[in-house]
Image (cartoon, rainbow, N blue to C red):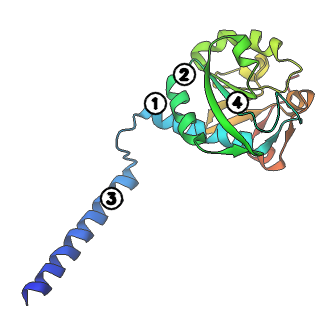
């Protein structure tokens, strides 16, 4: 075999080995630099981004079409980071998405959607009362949150991340829900 031919074979062999190693890591769920906690919030963030795409807020809401569409994150730095990355450079109805950290009801009232961390669930009832008839979607991650006033709540069912949705509460807030979102949700009829 010539020198060139042996070099080509060596490159093919290394490429095949690299491909097998990459396949192994993918099949084993390996992600470089992402902890299990952050990995879960990466999934949560993508869910939230899609919630925004499949919900329709009344027009005009908190300003004109040039103002940002504000997503608030209350009490969860990993979710804030992941949601900021998931929404970077994206728009909803020509409005740029902006992710903000919130830690007071007055700040949350300025958002179109607020993600409330599990450790902050004691704020849920106050927040729900403050935005009762306002088109502000509350997304939570604590068991029983739909009954306490959340519009959407993340739950684990059969080892999978799912979400509960309260259509009547969103309709009261004049927020329309796409049929695709309803089909994927666990529907709650809690008033």
Tell me the CA gap for discs 3 and 1.
23 Å
Q: Which residue is mark 2?
A: 76
| Pointer 3 or 1: first along the chain | 3
Label annotation for residue 37: 1
Front tag of 4 and 3: 4
Tell me if I can see residue 40 in this picture: yes
Secondary structure beneath label 2: loop
Q: Quadrant of the C terminus?
A: top right
Label 2 to label 4: alpha-carbon separation:
16 Å
Q: Quadrant of residue 113?
A: top right
Asked if disc 3 and disc 2 are in contact, CB closer than 8 Å, the reply is no
Q: Earlier in the sequence, mark 2 or mark 4?
A: 4
- What residue appears at the point 17 percent right and 80 percent down from the top-left corner? 9
Residue 94 x %, y %: 75, 45
Q: Nearer the viewer, residue 46 or 88?
A: 88
Give the Cα separation between the discs numbered 4 and 3.
Answer: 38 Å
Q: Earlier in the sequence, mark 1 or mark 2?
A: 1
């Amino acid at each position: 075999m010539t020198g060139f031919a042996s070099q080509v074979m060596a490159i093919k062999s290394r490429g095949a080995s690299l491909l097998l190693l990459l396949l192994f890591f993918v099949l084993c769920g390996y992600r470089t630099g992402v902890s299990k906690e952050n990995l879960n919030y990466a999934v949560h963030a993508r869910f939230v981004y899609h919630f925004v795409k499949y919900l329709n807020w009344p027009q005009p809401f908190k300003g004109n079409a040039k103002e940002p569409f504000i997503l608030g994150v209350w009490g969860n730095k990993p979710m804030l980071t992941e949601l900021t990355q998931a929404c970077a450079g994206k728009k909803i109805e020509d409005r740029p998405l902006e992710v903000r950290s919130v830690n007071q009801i007055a700040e949350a009232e300025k958002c179109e959607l607020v993600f409330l961390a599990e450790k902050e669930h004691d704020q849920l009832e106050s927040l729900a009362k403050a935005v009762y008839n306002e088109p502000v979607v509350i997304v939570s991650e604590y068991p029983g949150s739909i009954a306490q006033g959340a519009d959407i709540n993340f739950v684990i069912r059969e080892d999978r991340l799912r979400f509960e949705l309260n259509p009547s509460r969103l309709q009261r807030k004049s927020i329309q829900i796409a049929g695709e979102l309803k089909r994927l949700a666990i529907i709650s009829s809690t008033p």
